[in-house]
Amino acid sequence: MKLLEGKVAIITGASRGIGRGIAEVFAKHGANVAFTYSSSVASAEALEAELNSLGIKAKGYQSNAADFNEAQTFVDAVLADFGTVDILINNAGITKDNLLMRMSEADFDQVIDVNLKSVFNMTKAIQRTFLKQRAGSIINISSVVGVSGNAGQTNYAASKAGAIGFTKSVALELGSRNIRCNAIAPGFIETEMTAKLPEDVVKGWREGIPLKRGGTVEDVANACLFLASDMSAYVTGQVLNVCGGMLT
Ligand SMILES: NC(=O)c1ccc[n+]([C@@H]2O[C@H](COP(=O)([O-])OP(=O)(O)OC[C@H]3O[C@@H](n4cnc5c(N)ncnc54)[C@H](OP(=O)(O)O)[C@@H]3O)[C@@H](O)[C@H]2O)c1
């Protein structure tokens, strides 16, 4: 059964990693996909071709989610190209880890801009469309460190905790218009980023997780599929930890 047949989904930051996994799962479930990326032109073009070959409509847009005006320009382009939008996944994110003692103001600001301000930018840009159609599902990709905190990641954890506060507030504000907003808090997800880490470090992480493995991008994408589809029609304002039991 295809859960998103004919729906239009925006996914920010889908040229690789979790965003790419979400795009692939959504396309397999019949969604048309408009996605953004920052600089990975070749992988974005490859993804666009791969998704279109599945018989849905897909298009990649180079757009900086941290820029308020660019976010609006991107959403306007998607509306012109696809006619409507039903689902917004705010996935674009970066890390600039350091101990607070060594963290620069620029590294704090950049992480907040890309991870949190982008969520505001994109939600503002799509709000009118969702209000008019009296429907919409917004999913913000937070992190377990936004729930629990993490030494060496004050900027990142603050951005991800901020995304949770934003999620709950949007759910309260827009619920009466049938607009749902939820957050997903992934734990340790094995992507290209984590593939660069030493094997013993990764092994240690895996052993500390109750399910004894890192997550896959499909694990996160399947949770997004649930929250994007009508299967979760009565779920809003929630944070779903997709972390193999790291947080209980
Ligand atoms: N991996 C994990 O273990 C984990 C755990 C918890 C939460 N998360 C969150 O999940 C999300 C995806 O993580 P990931 O591991 O898949 O990251 P990733 O592999 O580094 O991919 C990040 C994606 O975001 C795009 N991007 C970066 N800055 C952008 C900007 N300013 N505007 C638009 N797009 C931008 C990148 O585009 P380019 O390719 O062009 O740079 C790329 O497509 C992030 O929000 C991250 O914080 C990840």
Image (cartoon, helix red, strand yellow):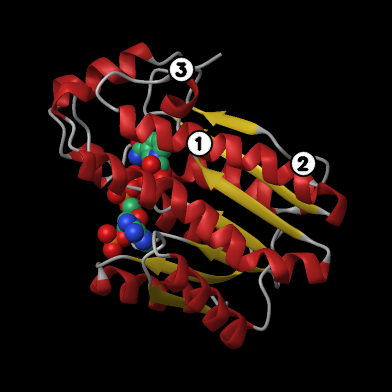
> What's the mark number on residue 162?
1
| Depth check, front residue: 153 or 48 | 153
In the drawing, does residue 173 fall left or right of residue 213?
A: right
> What's the mark number on residue 89?
none
SS class of the residue under badge 1? helix
Residue 117 visible somewhere in the drawing = yes
For mark 1, does the 10 Å Cα neighbourhood hold few (<14), some (14 to 19), or many (20 or more) residues? some
Residue 220 x, y percent position in the rendering: 50, 41
In the drawing, does residue 179 fall left or right of residue 59?
A: right
Q: At 23% from the left edge and 20% from the top edge, which residue is drawn?
A: 203
Q: Amino acid at mark 3?
A: Met
Residue 47 x, y percent position in the rendering: 37, 70
Q: Which residue is mark 3?
A: 246
Q: Looking at the image, is mark 1 or mark 2 earlier in the sequence?
A: 1
The answer to whether mark 3 is within 8 Å of ligand 1 is no
Q: Amino acid at mark 2?
A: Leu
Residue 146 x, y percent position in the rendering: 46, 28
Contact between labelled residues 1 and 3, with CB atoms less than 8 Å apart: no
For mark 2, does the 10 Å Cα neighbourhood hold few (<14), some (14 to 19), or many (20 or more) residues? some
| Depth check, front residue: 184 or 32 | 184
Q: Amino acid at mark 1?
A: Gly
Residue at the extreme right of the image, as rendered: 176
Between the residue at mark 3 and the residue at mark 1, the CA separation in whole angstroms equals: 20 Å
**The quarter of the displayed image where residue 76 is located:** bottom right
Q: At 48% from the left edge and 75% from the top edge, which residue is drawn?
A: 74
SS class of the residue under badge 2? helix
